[in-house]
Amino acid sequence: MKFSYSLIKKLLPKAPASRRIMEKMNLHAFEVESVEGDTLEIKLPANRYSDASSHIGIAREVGAIFGLPFKSPVRSIINVPSGKRLVNVEVKEKQACLRYIARYFEIDKLPVTPDWMKKSLKSCGVQSINGVVDLMNYVMLEVGQPLHAFDADKLVGKIIVRKAKPEERITTLDGKDFILSRNDLVIADESRALAIAGIKGGKHAGVEKTTKKIVVEAASFDYVGIFKTSRFLKLQTDASLRFAHNLSPELAGLAMDRVTELLVKAGAKLKDSAESYPVKAKGTTVYFDLKKFEKLTGETIDMGKVKKYFEALGFGFDGKKVQVPAWRSDVFEFEDLAEELSRMVGFGGMKSIPPMVSIKPTFEDEDFLFSSKFRHLLSRMGFDEVLTSSFVGDELNKISDQSFFGADFRNVEVLNPIAEDRKCMRRGLTPLLASVIEQNSRFFNEAKIFEIGKVFAWQGKSAEEKLVLGLAVGGKKKSDSALLLKGAMDEILRSVGLTDFIFEEISGHLYIKIGNRAIGFLRDFENFGKAKGWTLAVGELDLSHIIEIAEEEFAYKPIPKYPAVMRDISLVVDGSVRIGDIVEEISLINEKLVADVDLVDEYWDEKFGSKQSLTFRVVFQADNHTLTDEEVNVEMERIVGMLKDKFQIEIR
């Protein structure tokens, strides 16, 4: 927002140079973005428009920062004539218009705008129009409250604050036409709309050179309504910007008194007034505790300075209670007072004292650690991670009949669902992963995906949730997706030290069990959904239970100092041989040198018959030296010999 340095200087004669003001305000109040000539560009926080979007507010801040006495130029007008019925006001929308003041003036001729006022207006980006309009804009800049003047001779009957009629039209002062809606607030007389409330005046009752009688308006409007109307009409003005930031109703009275004083000095005669102010805004009382402030900030300050700073900011202070004026709508609790006091002291000048905190041992989140391990493992196995919605419909939840919840568990339903097919929390990942595979079947020949997430169900009076790992493998090739998925699940369980599990087929479905408890299951599909010609296998593992019984401990391992060597083995083996068994045997051939084993290719062809063609990548790495080709060749020969003996492979 733009401010005039010459106007600040007029309000605070002892104010320092504009550059000095910029430096200090950046440390104690607001960010001054630039100083060019007579203009200061100041970035105001949204909650400070009620007091600081005015030159009086900025002058008060500058005075408090530099320790200069400041006195507001606004004087209360006590003898205000009323009841002559020259101006009457009816507020039909009291929730949208909190306060409305109208004063009736007679003028012999329009006042002439002095050059110093024109300069101040120009510095703030406001164009000089005529003596009356310039006075309205000047007081708005000085006090922060927008004002508007109507030509009284053009008004028909009383002033009415109401909502616009459907499709009601208005031509604004700049000649633009707007079609209003029922949600828009207008200032009207008994014949038509005169202004878009809080935003722009209408052309019909605008002040001209021949105007002899005026009605000046100072009002307070609901900021939400002003913001919505401004957005709807795509019309933003100085007034709408200020009103949309929740100005205090008290500003309307201050601004009206100030403009009355200036109009009377310019020769106008105040003849009548009317006001609607059903619920008066009141300042708040906040208790200040010096010890609490010192504990919060670590800064020691004497009560004399506290009183000095609070009074400089316009607050009343008796040593315990702070009287916050109504126009400081951003201050309502002790922490707000602490902030005001701290910025007056200066954040940069406060001592840096480290806080005293209790040191607690670090907490290891096992869910996170295990999930991270599984993500890395599955990524090396060629799986891609997906994220599906936690909200599903009844039909999709029914597919999760093989979830880890018993038959007596019910769906967890959302009270306010975003859609009918999103009203339940998911009971399992199987249908969601199958859906992702189906969507991708149009673009790829194969897909391997996984997701780690929570599933939910309801039993009795409480809901339960489990952490689940879901995997899905699909493809067009005549490959056994179920076998590949089974090998992946086997590898996952062994990676955390679980070996005493079995795969057991029950009622056509494959379950993974430890003892009598199922910790996972696998389902096999053919020609599912729109993915014709695809085979699909989907499985889930109950990570909540697996993490509880896992034997592996996480430990720090230093980054290897010596480079790794990779070799590939391509072989043909009987289709009944488990891929996981091959990986395990290669890994055990020399645990000191074999760092990793991955399946990198799988191929089926009719010429192989019941056999499968596989390619494994073996990573060799030593902890204490760089491996030579001779050492790696020896290990490769051992691996090939072992595979021929145990699995009767043929090297391709």
Image (cartoon, rainbow, N blue to C red):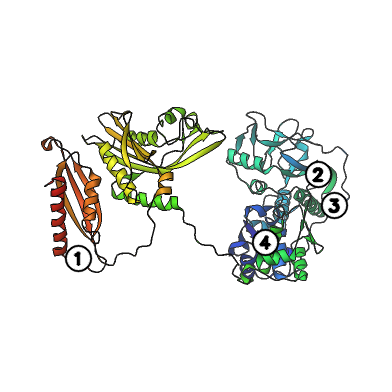
In the rendered image, residue 421, in percent from the top left (x then y), is placed at 47, 30
On residue 77, which mark appears? Answer: 3
Q: Is residue 143 above or below residue 94?
A: below
Bin the neighbour count of mark 1 within 10 Å (Cα to Cα): few under 14, some 14-19, many 20 and up: some
Marks 2 and 4 sit apart, C-alpha to C-alpha, by: 39 Å
Label 1 vs 3, first from the N-terminus? 3
Task: Tell me the SS state at disc 4.
Answer: helix
Mark 4 or mark 1, which is nearer the start of the sequence?
Answer: 4
Question: Of the residues tagged 2 and 3, which is closer to the observer?
Answer: 3
Q: Which mark is residue 627?
A: 1
Residue name at image x 35 percent, y 42 percent: 450
Circle 2: residue type? Arg
Q: Secondary structure at mark 3?
A: loop
- Viewer-proximal residue among 63 and 588: 588
Residue kind at label 3, given as amino acid type: Ile
What label sits on residue 538 in the rendered view? none
Residue 7 showing in the rendered view: no
Q: CA distance from mark 2 to mark 1?
A: 95 Å
Residue at image x 81%, y 45%?
Answer: 105
On the question of residue 515 being in view, the answer is yes
- In the displayed structure image, the side of residue 115 where residue 86 appears, left or right: right
Q: Which residue is mark 2?
A: 103
* Alpha carbon separation for disc pair 2 and 3: 12 Å
Residue 565 vs 154, above or below: the answer is below
Q: Earlier along the polypeptide chain: callout 2 or callout 3? A: 3
**How far from the left and from the top, in percent, is residue 557?**
35, 63
Residue designated by label 4: 339
- Say which of 153 and 422 sits in front: 422
**In the figure, residue 341 lies in which quadrant?**
bottom right
Query: Would you say 284 lies left or right of 164 here?
Result: right
Q: Earlier in the sequence, mark 4 or mark 3?
A: 3
